[in-house]
Amino acid sequence: MTTGTETGTRALRALLAVPGPFLSVYFDLDPRPEMGLDAEERWQGFCRDLARQGAGTHDLDALTRRFLSSQPGSGVLAAFAAGGEVAHSAVLPGCEQRDLALLAPLPRLLPLLTWRQEHPAHVVAVVDRTGADLRLYPAGATDGAPRTIVGSDDEIERNRPGGRSQMRYQHRAEDSWEHNAVEVAEVLGTALTEVDAHVLMLAGDVRARQYLTKHLPTWVRRDVAIRPVSGSRSPDGAWPHRMAQVEAETCRAGRQETSALLRDYAEQLSPHGRGAEGIYATVRALADGALRTLLITEDLAGRRTAWFGPGPADIADQPATPPPDTTPLVRADLADTAVRSALLTGADVRVLPPGAPGAPAQGIGGLTRHTRHA
């Protein structure tokens, strides 16, 4: 079982490898005083709803144990149970998904993926003249891995007695600051690559940030969005405010990624482009393993069905008679089925809000790996 804030593709693929059916739960752990019910009473209502849908006792007990281990007020609990165990769970701070309880052949991953794309991979760096404190956040993570860099040059003070030696002391200190910035820049480039991040939040001493920016690898200055945030390495009480800034900037970066993707999609919707639009074209691309990015609207869930089999690319928009001695296809929600095939065939998934400008017709489409031929 995976827990915490793990929402990476590898964990979701492991979840999809578990035999269903699945209980999918999204439960807001924040207090709801306006409802007149505490969290445990609301959870009991959840369990009654799932039991009416046909959920088994062992799955409900496993989910309840996971709920009881959660910290009140920490966000939305996303949990998926099958075979009497919680196959995957994550707490999603700031998630806006309404409470949801569902028994279905496949897990309902759209809300989790929506939250994850609003938290793209990023690195937070707080620098001074001696080094830096880093936190590395893979996509969808809320707990950053800490890393400290201590520069090898320790002559950082330039305030010396006056006289002819003053300028010499100042230059020596400036050289030390810059040498330390070079070391920080090198480690920072590696850290960004490690979590595949294209967003860097930078805080700390102004002069140290100037030196660091100057010495960042060329690809970082070209491909990474550098966003200033407040605070310093000293315990100045700025941590909560800085993290609020990081959260806001990360969400903004996620929205910008979606906008850029939709612009690319619009350009590729041509006879010889890489755009697929609508149910038939998208399902066919998924079945061929040809889809690179799936675009899907939130409100497609619950509107249409499709069929899936044991293989990653086993998906069909219409029922078909399977050949003898083969496993028959299973009917499931179209959105869940498309997400399953996308994740298992190595495609990215981008969830769009209902009515998003530029969204594909029928609420589903995507970019293929290769240009279509007429």
Image: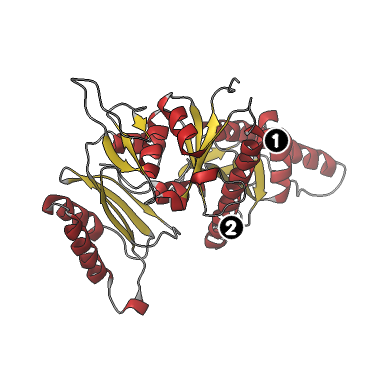
Please tell me which residue is depicted at 52% across the width and 54% down the height of the picture: 354
Q: Which callout, 1 or 2, points at the residue further toward the start of the chain?
A: 1
Q: Where is residue 204 in the image (x, y as percent from the top left)?
A: 64, 51
- Residue closer to the observer: 140 or 192: 140
For the point 74% across and 43% down, the residue is 210
Task: Say which residue label 2 marks.
Answer: 245
Q: In which quarter of the image is residue 75?
A: bottom left
Q: Which residue is drawn at 60% across and 43% down?
A: 257
Asked if the residues shown at circle 1 and circle 2 are in contact, with their CB atoms under 8 angstroms apart, the answer is no
Q: Quadrant of the C terminus?
A: top right
Query: In this view of the protein, which residue sits in the foreground, 35 or 20?
Result: 20
Residue at horizontal 54%, vertical 55%?
247
Q: Quadrant of the N terminus?
A: top left
83 is higher (above) or lower (below) than 316: below
Side of 41 where 35 appears, left or right? right
Report the residue marked by disc 1.
Answer: 221
Does dot 2 land on a helix, a strand or a loop? helix
Image position, residue 170 (x, y; %)? 79, 42
Disc 2 residue crowd, few under 14, some 14–19, many 20+, Cα 10 Å:
some
Whether residue 125 is visible: no
Q: Residues within 10 Å of mark 1 (few under 14, many from 20)?
A: few
Residue 290 coordinates in the image, percent (x, y): 48, 25
What type is the residue that disc 1 sits on? Arg
Amino acid carrying mark 2 in the image? Gln
Tag 1 secondary structure = helix
Residues under labels 1 and 2: Cα distance? 21 Å
Is 140 displayed left or right of 102 in the figure? Answer: right
